[in-house]
Image: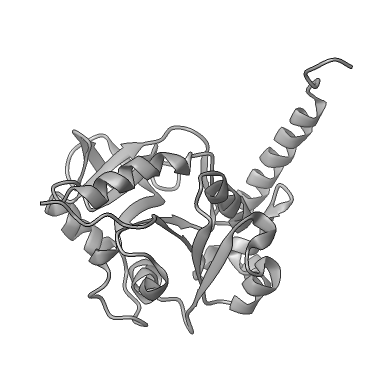
Amino acid sequence: MARAMTPDIGAMILAAGRGERMRPLSDTTPKPLLQAGGKPLIVWQIEALVRAGFRDIVVNAAHLRQRFVDTLGDGSAYGARLHWSFESAPLEVAGGIATAIPLLPSGPTLVIAGDVYTKFDYASFRSRAQAMARDASDARVHLVLVPNPPYHPNGDFALVDGRVSLEGAPRHTYASIGVYDTALFRELPRGSPLKLLPYLQRWIASGQVSGETFTGTWANVGSPADLAQLDAELRAASTLCARQPKSGNA
């Protein structure tokens, strides 16, 4: 049985976390607004979404939430249209998505973390989301998994024949990048803190979650040391790019 086609694919950036491991920097600046390579972390994500054709972007915010509006405005400076879902206190991932439901289109929505830096091509999700919208037998969630970072050596999930599994090996780490059928969140209470993992485990156990691995550039910026390392890498890459000879005639 086919699902109704959606008019567009939604996009949401999760930015409501308190960023405890990033203190003291996050005491005065929301973690996603901390800069690396001359830009706030969340701006790298906004620009990547816009390049991939996602222009209407929902952002949830709680800690120092007005700072987001003061810094990013309506998103037009980046070619985006930002829609704000404010939380009086962080509602965790599932709670944040459920609370933002009125701002999201029905059907598939790309959900990413505002404190991740990656070169993953979000445009690749369009065909995946269209398949989810068309076919009720297809997965209702699609996750991107990455090699386990040093701080998370045991990983989160396995990938078996294109489906995410709670058992098996090798295990990979969830990249905080995924496509979700928003219908999964529409019956959840709004304004309540709800962790995503229990729901993910339930959906995985029922075979509703597909996945893929990504071995390219990806960094979960969790601490001041992580931020300093990413900043140094991005600035070095920018300097190297500036030194490259330009093509064409002089």
Taking depth in this image into account, of 174 and 53 the one nearest to the observer is 53
Q: Is residue 102 above or below residue 176?
A: below
In the image, farthest residue toward the right: 250
The coloring applied to the image is one colour
Q: Position of residue 10 (x, y in %)?
A: 41, 58
Residue occupying the point 69% across, 68% down? 71
Please identify the quadrant where the C terminus is shown. top right
Residue occupying the point 51% across, 47% down? 53
* Residue 151 located left or right of residue 231: left
Residue occupying the point 70% across, 34% down? 237
Taking depth in this image into account, of 168 and 113 the one nearest to the observer is 113
Residue 155 visible at all: no
* Residue 35 located left or right of residue 14: right
Q: Is residue 150 above or below residue 141?
A: above
Taking depth in this image into account, of 57 and 70 the one nearest to the observer is 57
Q: Position of residue 51 (x, y in %)?
A: 56, 44
Q: Position of residue 112 (x, y in %)?
A: 45, 55
Q: Is residue 191 above or below residue 152?
A: below
